[in-house]
Image: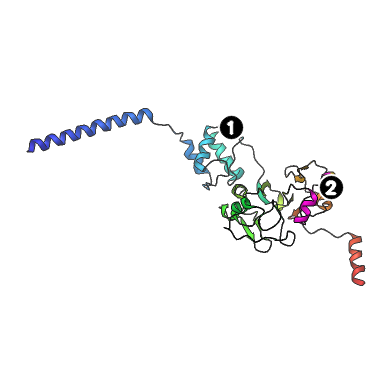
Amino acid sequence: MSEIVLYTILTVTAVGVTAATILYFAAQKFKVFEDPRIDQVEEALPSANCGGCGYPGCRNFADACVKADNLDSLFCPVGGNETMAKVAKILGKEVAQQAPKVAVVKCNGQPKFRARINVYDGPISCTIEHMMGAGDTACQYGCLGGGECVEACKFDAIHMNPNTMLPEVIDELCTACGACVVACPRDIIELRTKNKKDRKIFVSCVSQDKGATTTKVCQVGCIGCSKCLKVCEYDAITIGNNLAFIDSDKCRLCRKCVDVCPTNSILEIGFPPRKLKKEDSGADINQSNA
C-alpha cells in the first residue's frame, strides 16, 4: 500500500515539474518586452484617466509617448506644458509648448431670449431629447439643459445655472480634457485658447438657419450678417452656413465685432466695464434732468 502511495506522489511530482518546465519555456518564448520608460512616463502623468489626450487612460498615453518618434501630436491637457516637459525629459525628446485651452458654451439661449414652447416629460437626457426633436424650445441647435456635460466632467468644472438654464464653465477648474465636448449631442461646447485674465470673445450660437428663422426662435442668435467679418482687422472671423465663427488663435480681443453685432450674439467675457463716451453720459444726464 505504501508503494502505491509513493508511486502516486512521484508521478504527480513528475507531471508537475514537466508542466512547469513547459510553461516556463513557453513564457520565455512568447513574453512581451515592455519598455521600463512607460512606467516612468505614467508616473509623471496626473493619473486623471480622462481620455482628453485621445487615449483610453494615462497608461496607454504613456505607451504612445514612448513609442512615438516625436511628441508633436501628443499632449496631456490636464497636466499641460509642465507635465509634457517632464515626459520629454524622461524620453530625451523635445516638445513644443501649447497654449492652454478652456471649454466654452456656445449658446446664450436663456429663457428671456428663447421662449419655452414645449414641455418635455421624458428622461433627463440631452441625447434622448435631441433624438426626439427640438426640446422645449423651437431652436433645434441650442442647449437642451439636461446636464450631460456636467455629468461627464471629472473635475467639477461645469455646472448648470438654474436661472439661465445653461451650463457654465469654471475656468480655474477646467482642464480642457474635452469630456463635455464629446458629451454634448448638439456640439455647442468648444475648446478655445485661454487668454490672460480668462478674457474671451466668441459667437455664442451654433444655429445654421437663415437669419429670419433664427431670430424667430432666439433673440440673440447669429444671423450671419457679416458685419463682424467686415470690421475684423485680424482675419479671425469667417462666415459659413449662416453662422459666424471667431478663431480664438487669431482673435486679438479688440471687441470691434462685439460692437457691431445686431443681435448681441457675440459675447465678451472677463473684460472690465466699458467706459461711457461723453455723448452717452451727456445723454444720460439730459434724460435724468428731463
Q: Residue furthest bottom?
A: 289
Is residue 117 shown left or right of residue 14?
A: right
Question: Over which residues does the magenta segment extend?
Answer: 209-229
Residue drawn where x is 54% and y is 40% of the image: 55
Q: Nearer the viewer, residue 152 or 80?
A: 152
Q: Nearer the viewer, residue 165 or 197?
A: 165
Q: Amino acid at mark 1?
A: Asn
Is residue 263 shown left or right of residue 131?
A: right
Look at mark 2 in the image and give the residue it sits on.
Answer: 227
> Label 2 crowding class (10 Å Cα cut-off): few <14, some 14-19, many 20+?
some
Query: Which is in the foreground here, disc 1 or disc 2?
Result: 2
Q: How is the image coloured?
A: rainbow
Residue drawn where x is 52% and y is 34% of the image: 66
Give the vertical position of 290 relative to 133 (above or below): below
Q: Amino acid at mark 2?
A: Lys
Number of marks present in the image shown: 2
Q: Quadrant of the N terminus?
A: top left
| Local SS, label 1 | loop
* Residue 148 is a magenta residue: no
Give the vertical position of 30 relative to 43 (above or below): above
Q: Nearer the viewer, residue 23 or 195?
A: 23
Look at mark 1 in the image and give the residue it sits on.
Answer: 70
Quarter holding residue 114 = bottom right
Q: Position of residue 116 (x, y in %)?
A: 70, 61
Real-space Cα distance between discs 1 and 2? Answer: 43 Å
Residue drawn where x is 61% and y is 43% of the image: 81
* Residue 222 is a magenta residue: yes
Callout 1–callout 2 Cβ contact below 8 Å = no
